[in-house]
Image: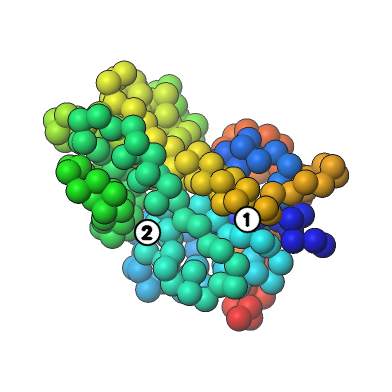
C-alpha cells in the first residue's frame, strides 16, 4: 500500500471517539480509516494517568501494527494525559484533540472567558487550560467535570427534562463566569450539543474538538502531501477490545452512518504488541 492510501488510525477508550471519526469522514471523505475502541477498559475518565498511559501504549502499538499513516487520539482524557508519551513511542505522527480544541476556542472567544467541560481526568489534568493560556495569556478558563453526561449521550437523551436539569447543575457555575465560548471536551458531549445549547443560550459558542482536530489533520496531511488521492471508495474498519451490547446501535448514532466491519480483538493480542 502506498503511503497516501494507508488508513488514518483513530483511538478512543470505547465508543465516544466515533464522534471524531464522523468529522474525519466528513472533512476527508476519501481517507481510509481504522478505529480502535478500547471498550474492555472504558471509562478512562475516572482512571489514573498511569493506567491511561498504559492503555494508550497498547492502542498505539496495535494501530502501528495495522500500518496506519497517522494516529488521532480521539479520546480527550488520553490526549490530556498521554499525548506526549504516545508521540515519544510512535513512529508515525500522533495528534490529540486538546490543542486543536484549544485553538478553536481561542479563535472564537471575544471576551477571553472560556469554559471547558470534560471527564474528571481531563479536567484534573488542566490540559485545556494550559493549552489555552499558552496561546492566549489573557484568557480566563473555568472547567467542570461532567461525568454523568457520558451516560446521557449513550442513552440518546438529547430532549429529556432530566438532561437539561443535570446540564444546568454542571454549567451554572461556568455561566456565572460569563463565558462566551465552551469546549465540549469529551468525545460524547457533541451528541448532546442541542441540549447544551439550550442551557447556555446563543451567547455561548460551543466548540467541538473533534471537528477542529479533523480540520487540523486535513491541514497536516495536505502540507505533507499525504492526502489519499486514490479513486477507490474508502474503507472504514472498527476494532474493539470488547463487544459491548448495543455497541453498533449506539455507535451508528455517534458516527452518523452504518458500521460495516466491526471486529473484536483479544486482550492477549493487545498485550503482545510492542
Ligand atoms: N472518551 C472519553 C473522553 O473523551 C470519555 C469516556 C471515558 O471516560 O472513557 O474523555
Q: How many marks?
A: 2
**Residue that appears at 55% across and 56% down:** 72
Task: Specify the farthest residue to the right.
Answer: 232
> Along the polypeptide, which appears first: circle 2 or circle 1?
2
Q: Give the residue number, with chain letter if any, for mark 2.
A: 80
The quadrant of the rendering that contains the C terminus is: bottom right
On screen, residue 130 versus residue 90, left or right, reads left
Label 2, ligand 1: CB separation under 8 Å: yes
In the image shown, does 247 or 132 lie closer to the viewer?
A: 132
Q: Give the residue number, with chain letter if any, for mark 1.
A: 224
**Residue that appears at 61% across and 60% down:** 70
- The answer to whether residue 197 is seen in the rendering is yes
**Is the residue 246 above or below the residue 49 in the image?**
above
Q: Secondary structure at mark 2?
A: helix
Q: Secondary structure at mark 1?
A: loop
**Residue that appears at 50% across and 39% down:** 211
**Is the residue 268 above or below the residue 172 in the image?**
below
Q: Position of residue 61 (x, y in %)?
A: 60, 73
Q: Position of residue 140 (x, y in %)?
A: 17, 42
- The answer to whether residue 43 is seen in the rendering is no
Amino acid at each position: 500500500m502506498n503511503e497516501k492510501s494507508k488508513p488514518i488510525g483513530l483511538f478512543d477508550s470505547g465508543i465516544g471517539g466515533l464522534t471524531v471519526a464522523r468529522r474525519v469522514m466528513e472533512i476527508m471523505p476519501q481517507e481510509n480509516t481504522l478505529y480502535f475502541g478500547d471498550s474492555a477498559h472504558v471509562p478512562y475518565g475516572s482512571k489514573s494517568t498511569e493506567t491511561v498511559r498504559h492503555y494508550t501504549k497498547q492502542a498505539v502499538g496495535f494501530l502501528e501494527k495495522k500500518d496506519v499513516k497517522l494516529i488521532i487520539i480521539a479520546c480527550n482524557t488520553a490526549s490530556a494525559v498521554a499525548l506526549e508519551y504516545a508521540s515519544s513511542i510512535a513512529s508515525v505522527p500522533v495528534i490529540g484533540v486538546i490543542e486543536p480544541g484549544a485553538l478553536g476556542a481561542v479563535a472564537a472567544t471575544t471576551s477571553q472567558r472560556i469554559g471547558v467541560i470534560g471527564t474528571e481526568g481531563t479536567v484534573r489534568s488542566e490540559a485545556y487550560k494550559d493549552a489555552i493560556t499558552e496561546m492566549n495569556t489573557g484568557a480566563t478558563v473555568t472547567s467542570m467535570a461532567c461525568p454523568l453526561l457520558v451516560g446521557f449521550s449513550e442513552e440518546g437523551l438529547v430532549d429529556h427534562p432530566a438532561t437539561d436539569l443535570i446540564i444546568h447543575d454542571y454549567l451554572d457555575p461556568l455561566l456565572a463566569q460569563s463565558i462566551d465560548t465552551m469546549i465540549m471536551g469529551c468525545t460524547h458531549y457533541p451528541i448532546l450539543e442541542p441540549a447544551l445549547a439550550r442551557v447556555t443560550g446563543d451567547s455561548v459558542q460551543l466548540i467541538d474538538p473533534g471537528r477542529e482536530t479533523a480540520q487540523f489533520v486535513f491541514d497536516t496531511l495536505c502540507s505533507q502531501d499525504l492526502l489519499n488521492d486514490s479513486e477507490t471508495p474508502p474503507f472504514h474498519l472498527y476494532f474493539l477490545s470488547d463487544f459491548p451490547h448495543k455497541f453498533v446501535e449506539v455507535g451508528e448514532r455517534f458516527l452518523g452512518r452504518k458500521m460495516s466491519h466491526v471486529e473484536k480483538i483479544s486482550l492477549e493480542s493487545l498485550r503482545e504488541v510492542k
